[in-house]
């Protein structure tokens, strides 16, 4: 942050950013937001994050790929993953490309979660079927996929 003379030491800012990136990947927006909350000036933070991206130390692509792998491992669907990445400041075209290149069989992912959650028990009634549809939708699976899985 600012020294006693009121100037910003870019090396300290860079070190703070690299420390955050050492823990885990961050989107550029996440990194900017975290550093701003710590009191660093916006213009300096944006410049530092831009430089880190140019040097390959920060990458929205790597972040998105890591995020998708993590969420697929937890049986989340593409709708939810797309929304969460969007909230974290990742560009829509990048999100779409990463989801497409992930090569995930979303139906199999939904079916695996459904089987684990409900252990092969058929819905008791119409209301129970609706609850199960809502659970799958909350996990981020598309409506058509949910209908196909439950029919």
Image (cartoon, rainbow, N blue to C red):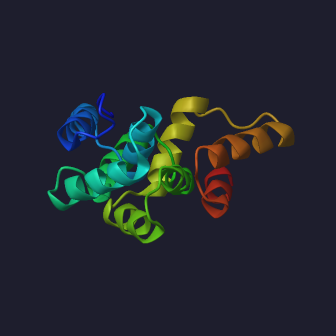
- For residue 127, what is the image quadrant? top right
Q: Which residue is at the front of the view, 151 or 48?
A: 48
x and y percentages locating residue 53 in the rendered image: 23, 57
User: Would you place residue 30 above or below residue 116 in this image?
Assistant: below
Residue 123's quadrant in the figure? top right
Q: Is residue 97 above or below residue 130?
A: below
Q: State left or right for residue 17 relative to residue 46.
A: left
Q: Which one is in front, 44 or 51?
A: 44
| Residue 59 drawn at (x, y percent) | 26, 55
> 134 or 124: which is nearer to us?
134
Q: Residue furthest front?
A: 5
Q: Residue furthest left?
A: 55
The residue positioned 32% from the left and 59% from the top of the image is 102
Quarter of image, res 39 = top left
Answer with left or right where residue 52 lies relative to residue 49: left
- Tell me residue 109's x, y (percent): 46, 48
Quarter of the picture holding the C terminus: bottom right
Residue located at (38% from left, 50% from top):
68
* Quadrant of image for the N terminus: top left
**In the image shown, does 66 or 107 lie closer to the viewer?**
66
The residue that appears at 23% across and 39% down in the rendered structure is 9
Residue 119 visible in image:
no
| Whether residue 80 can be seen here | yes
């Amino acid at each position: 942050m600012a020294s006693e003379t009121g100037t910003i030491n870019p090396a300290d800012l860079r070190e703070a950013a690299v420390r955050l990136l050492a823990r885990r990947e961050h989107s550029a927006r996440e990194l900017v937001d975290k550093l701003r909350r710590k009191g660093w000036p916006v213009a300096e933070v944006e410049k530092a994050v831009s430089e880190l991206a140019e040097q390959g130390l920060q990458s929205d692509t790597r972040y998105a790929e890591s995020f998708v792998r993590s969420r697929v491992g937890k049986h989340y669907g593409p709708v939810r993953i797309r929304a969460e990445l969007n909230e974290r400041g990742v560009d829509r075209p990048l999100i779409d490309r990463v989801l497409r290149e992930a090569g995930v069989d979303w139906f199999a992912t939904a079916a695996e979660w459904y089987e684990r959650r409900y252990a092969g028990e058929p819905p008791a009634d119409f209301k129970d079927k609706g609850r199960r549809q809502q659970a799958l939708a909350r996990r981020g699976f598309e409506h058509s996929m949910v209908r196909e899985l439950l029919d």
